Image: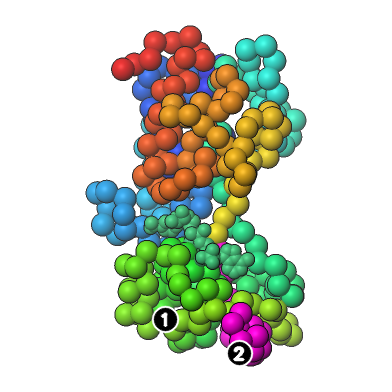
């Protein structure tokens, strides 16, 4: 099959773009290095996507995937590791050196979890340290856990951990004010999450498995050690911009791809959508950007813009 548009990344932006592109008459292929859904797929609960008052990220993403599959070809576990521009075409190369030639590219590679830089964190990853409550929370039922971070994701993870039966859930945040929306803070308090503010993680200790965390109060300098069975780190995300860098596309200071209101990047024929463009980074804005980018790609492909 000869494809016209190659979409890289299958989160809400990629799926939505796949639907809109094929419906606009564009032969479209969607690549994903995993099995789709992006970071949204590991959100325990999504409560602000219209039409779904409460739905798990994995279920919503599964529904989007099924929908997108009706239209675009979705190639999973197909990691695109290189992009080159040749005249008006783009050559996409996968990790096994197979190439695809397309006339337009949509980068929807999203973000990945930011890692915490503190003593021995890496050593205990998978042995008490996790970046995903939905994936690993179950192992900590009836146990004590900490969530590090003060954004929406951290609060949602903390509420979820309480909900699945963790005995004690502590939220550790480096400032005295949360970044998260008030609604999540209220829900967390109501659920019994205990807040430890103005504290940073200095390091963790254990033997085969994690046993404790050392905290430093940023105001008083006081150091305290706390027993814990698990630590869920939720301190934000970083853009997955490696492919954009290969094309020398313009990025902002934080590494997100710069786009105009039609989701065009600084290179003709290359579009970007979803969390990789920064901003609000919601499922609904990603899906919306995917739709716009897909229709904008008609200009690079010499097709009629449908509206
Ligand atoms: P975020 O909003 O960027 O929050 C990251 C949190 O981690 C902040 O509280 C930050 O502290 C803290 N942090 C960053 N680096 C740290 C470090 N080295 N040590 C300790 N703490 C650190 O990230 P997020 O919660 O993952 O959310 C990402 C995006 O998705 C946001 O735009 C968010 O609104 C969105 N989101 C939305 C929903 C929703 O609406 N339902 C749900 C989840 C996520 P400071 O506050 O001090 O900077």
Residues rendered magenta in the picture: 211-235
The residue positioned 41% from the left and 23% from the top of the image is: 295
Label 2 secondary element = strand
**Whole-percent x, y for residue 7 in the image:** 53, 31
The residue positioned 52% from the left and 73% from the top of the image is: 175
Identify the mark at residue 227; answer none if there is no mark: 2
* Residue at mark 2: C-beta within 8 A of ligand 1: no
**Whole-percent x, y for residue 33 in the image:** 61, 42
- Identify the residue position indicated by label 1 in the image: 193
Secondary structure mainly formed by the magenta segment: strand
Q: Which of the 4 quarters of the picture holds residue 43?
A: bottom left
Confirm whether residue 32 shows in the render.
no
Quadrant of the drawing holding the C terminus? top left
| Mark sitting earlier along the chain (2/1) | 1
- Label 2 and label 1: CA atoms lie apart by 16 Å
Foreground residue, 176 or 257? 176
Label 1 secondary element = loop
């Amino acid at each position: 099959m000869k494809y016209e548009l190659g979409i890289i990344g299958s989160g809400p932006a990629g799926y939505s773009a796949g639907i809109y592109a094929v419906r606009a008459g564009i032969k479209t292929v969607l690549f994903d290095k995993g099995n789709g859904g992006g970071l949204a797929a590991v959100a325990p609960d999504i409560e602000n996507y219209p039409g779904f008052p409460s739905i798990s990220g994995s279920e919503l993403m599964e529904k989007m995937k099924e929908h997108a599959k009706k239209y675009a070809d979705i190639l999973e576990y197909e990691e695109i590791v290189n992009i080159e521009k040749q005249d008006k075409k783009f050559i996409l190369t996968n990790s096994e050196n197979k190439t695809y030639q397309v006339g337009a590219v949509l980068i929807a590679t999203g973000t990945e979890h930011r890692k915490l830089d503190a003593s021995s964190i890496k050593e205990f990853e998978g042995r008490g340290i996790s970046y995903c409550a939905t994936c690993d929370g179950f192992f900590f039922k009836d146990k004590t856990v900490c969530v590090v971070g003060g954004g929406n994701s951290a609060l949602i993870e903390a509420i979820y951990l309480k909900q699945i039966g963790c005995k004690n859930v502590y939220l550790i945040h480096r400032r005295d004010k949360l970044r998260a929306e008030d609604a999540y803070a209220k829900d967390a308090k109501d659920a019994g999450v205990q807040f430890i503010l103005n504290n940073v993680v200095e390091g963790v200790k254990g033997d085969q498995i994690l046993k404790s965390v050392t905290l430093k109060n940023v105001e008083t300098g006081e150091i305290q050690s706390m027993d814990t069975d698990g630590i869920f780190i939720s301190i934000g995300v970083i853009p997955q911009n490696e492919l954009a860098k290969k094309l020398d596309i313009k990025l902002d200071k934080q590494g997100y791809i710069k786009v105009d209101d039609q989701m065009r990047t600084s290179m003709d024929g290359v579009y970007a959508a979803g969390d990789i463009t920064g901003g609000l980074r919601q499922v609904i804005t990603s899906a919306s950007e995917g739709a716009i980018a897909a229709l904008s790609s008609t200009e690079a492909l010499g097709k009629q813009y449908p509206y």
